[in-house]
Image (cartoon, rainbow, N blue to C red):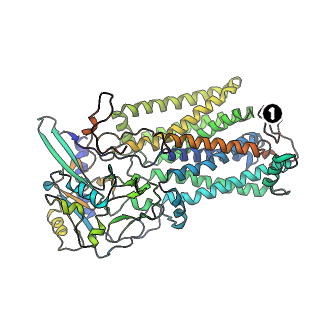
Amino acid sequence: MNLLATEVLVPRYGIAWYPWAVQYFFLIALSYTSLWLAAPGLIFGKRSWMPTARIAMLACVSTALVAPVALLADLHQPLRFWHFYGFPTPWSWMSLGSFILPLYLGAVLVLAWMSWRPALEERAQAPGWAGKVAGRLAWGRFRIPRPLIILVGLGALGLSLGIALYTGAEVAILRARPLWNTYWLPWMFVATGVIGACGLVLLLNRISRARNGATNRQMLTVLVMACLAAGLIALTWFLDGVNAETGSVAMALDSIRHNPEWRATALWGSFAGTLLLATAFFLRKRPGWRAWAWLVGLLALHVAWMFRWVVLMNVQTVARNSAGIHDYHVAFGSYGLLGILGTLGLWLAAILIIDLYIPWRGSEAKAIDTTTSSNPLDSSQGAPSHG
Amino acid sequence: MDPIRRTLLGQLARLSAGAALIPLSSVATAGINDQPSRRGGDPEKRYGMLIDLRRCIGCQACTVSCHIENAAPLGNFRTIVSQFEVEHEETGELATFMLPRLCNHCEDPPCVPVCPVQATFQRRDGIVVVDSDRCVGCAYCVNACPYDARFINKETQVADKCTFCAHRLEAGLLPACVESCVGGARIIGDMRDPQSEISRLIEQHRDELMILKPEKNTRPQVFYLGMDERFTTRPDEAKPGIWDVRNQQGKEIGYEFAGH
């Protein structure tokens, strides 16, 4: 017997996590995956990866600085953030994250400072306020031993794995939302994070006027691999659940079946992902076209951001008990558009301040080996060049 | 929903209601996302609720009295009665179905272990409460509850939910929703006391009782008598009624509970 049910009076259950959460998940994923992109050059001493490591470290630090602000803003009681530390709760993923996050931020800042120090020290000789600021930041004249940099780098890498694990698990354990409740979600967060980080490095490689050819090539290679990995994870998730009556795949198929907006989103997601893979693959094969790699970078950032938007915002509009789907429109205020733009603005400010005061371009090569000069193709001079 | 899945879920609802009736003593575990130990409340008691749907007329007196008692902001509900107009697909026969919803004060509440500051906790009498002075308003619990029983109170900016009117129970009063129920459909009581009305009713109707969303393994302690098993989970393809009221510009009208 089948029935047609009309729910006469449907209460509206609003979303509980706001776009701030998307911004946090986006920025922190960019940060820890950028650290991974910086690791071969900066931590493991691969010289060919040094130009990439410089840009990736800039991306890593700037996003790591802004991400906690977005996270704090998503709390309804931001001034009570100290409760996280006053009442440690080891069985809650979010509480674990609140301890991993500042440690990660600290490790990243120390690592960045260590890698920028030689150039800061050099600039400290320069006349004027730039030299003074650099002198203060360099904190004296001494040489940080390479093993210490490696040690801090490995610590930061370990903590970055903690961030990747907790951000994924935090969402994936929620049985109440079947679309989230899958082991494949944390992997997808990581894969799309790498996609976004490659995009950000490609973009920064262009707008910082570093325009390093090797960086473009390396990032396009990683991008292609990350796209393939993301596709494989999505496929495994789908095959894993395609025959199940309940669970995230069944729920996703249900949502697509009943809602034209979800259909459009799914179509756009698949299209953008395929386009990204195709263009990255094409540019990798055609060095002549690589000047346009930054456009691929923008698309990669879009894919990484959109995945988080769909997962965190759209999924919250799926009704759990009541009929229909909950309407959600991005508000203009700080709970919506202003929040999204605000975090972007803050990130821009962070990156501009770093660019203004810190000679990030030419430092890491010297941190590894002060005797050899770096590739002349890199704009590895101490001073920023906006040429 | 296909018939096989429906039957399966129905049986699951019955079986799980049976399993959920065995109140386990609180066990403290250390694993991530495991239930922490309970605190506060009377360890001799275990509160639960039985809702006799045969007596519910969908008057929303419980919704209103709860709103007045607990001062929830307009548009948020600690309890509400879902009202369905049901039409038989073949015969066109019409019926109504009423489903009062509230926090299930689960034996395995998914909202408790997620709380990063232990503001949400379960008392030893089974009632799940929020310490509003400690809550940081991260809304993790709101997303963790499969029953939509929680919300962020926009006036206090902290998590808010049904407490079985713990403040009234402690004063020897019944919860507002129970007190105001016209048909006497809501029965609350101590399930550890074999002489309580709820214990007797549970004993009498043990095989007919159902719980909501048994597949979530939360072991709810709100039991429904006279339940149609198709409503233990969200009825597939149910249409919203009042949402369809729109003006000429396609904008929703006539919906008083919208929060914006």
Quarter of the image where the N terminus of chain B is located: top left
Q: Residue at x 39, y 72 (%)?
A: B39
Question: The disc numbered 1 marks a residue on which chain?
Answer: A
Q: Is residue A366 visible?
A: no
Q: Which of B16 and A258 is in front in this view?
A: A258
Image side of residue A277 versus residue A11, left or right: right
Image side of residue A47 versus residue B41, left or right: right
Q: What residue type is labelled 1?
A: Leu
Q: Nearer the viewer, residue B15 or A313?
A: A313
In percent of width and height, residue B223 lies at: 23, 59
Q: Residue at x 81, y 49 (%)?
A: A120
Residue beneath label 1, please? A377
Q: Can residue B223 be seen in this view?
A: yes
User: Quick one: SS at disc 1?
Assistant: loop
- Position of residue A109 relative to residue A316, above or below, is below
In percent of width and height, residue B91 lies at: 11, 35
Q: Which of A364 and A186 is in front in this view?
A: A364
